[in-house]
Image (cartoon, grey):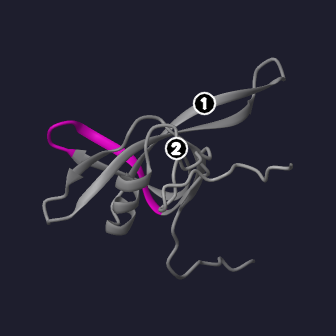
């Protein structure tokens, strides 16, 4: 008979998501002088449909940011349509005003690229060149 093996140690169930922020984040006071941020991320997955074809499916993932430094990053750099990659774990709770709530608590967050917008002027009031000019 084979012996049963048991995992001993701390485990975290985590998920990784890559997508775009659906709406501008909202912020709430946690009651202890800190604040948290709430936002939703729109991600796409490919799923096999009944007809055997792959279909792109949109999923909206509710995110909660509780770490103070990450909340500051969200406040300063995240807005609607910003690309994000997050690692998060699932959490549910009972809210006395809204009933059962759930979301993914962000552990790691990476900001995606945003479109390049050239500066109109530098510190000396000069407009930077977009490319070298050949004469």
Percent x, y of residue 121: 51, 52
- Give the structural element (helix, strand or loop) at label 1: strand
Return the residue nearer the eye: 134 or 122. Answer: 134
As drawn, the label of residue 99 is none
The secondary element bearing badge 2 is classed as loop
Q: Earlier in the sequence, mark 2 or mark 1?
A: 1
Q: Relative to the observer, which residue lies in front, 72 or 99? A: 72
Q: In x, y percent, where is residue 51?
A: 81, 17
Residue under the image location 86 percent in, 49 percent down: 135
Could you tell me which residue is drawn at 14 percent across and 66 percent down?
A: 32
71 or 100, nearer to the observer: 71
Find the residue positioned furthest to the top: 51
Which residue, as the protein is rendered here, is positioned at the far front? 135
Q: Residue at x 32, y 52 (%)?
A: 37
Please state, as top left, top right, bottom left or bottom right, where the N terminus lies in the image.
bottom right
Residue for badge 2: 82
Q: Nearer the viewer, mark 2 or mark 1?
A: 2
Magenta region: which residues?
95-107
Name the spot of residue 118 as percent of width and height, x first: 59, 47
- CA gap, disc 2 to disc 1? 16 Å
Kindly indicate whether the residue at mark 1 contacts the one at mark 2 (C-beta within 8 angstroms): no
Left or right: 115 as drawn, with respect to 82: right
3 on left or right of 38: right
The residue at which mark 1 appears reads as 58
Confirm whether the magenta stretch covers residue 103.
yes
């Amino acid at each position: 008979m084979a012996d049963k093996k048991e995992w001993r140690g701390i485990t975290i169930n985590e998920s990784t998501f890559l997508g775009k922020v659906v709406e501008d984040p909202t912020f709430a006071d946690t009651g202890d002088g800190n604040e948290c941020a709430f936002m939703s991320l729109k991600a796409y997955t490919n799923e096999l449909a009944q007809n055997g074809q792959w279909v792109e499916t949109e999923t909206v993932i509710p995110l909660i940011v509780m770490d103070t430094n990450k909340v500051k990053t969200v406040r300063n750099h995240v807005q609607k349509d910003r690309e994000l990659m997050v690692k998060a774990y699932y959490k549910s709770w009972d809210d006395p005003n809204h009933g059962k709530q759930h979301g993914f608590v962000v552990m790691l967050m990476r900001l995606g690229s945003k479109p390049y917008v050239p500066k109109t002027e530098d510190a000396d009031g000069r407009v930077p060149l977009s490319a070298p000019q050949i004469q």
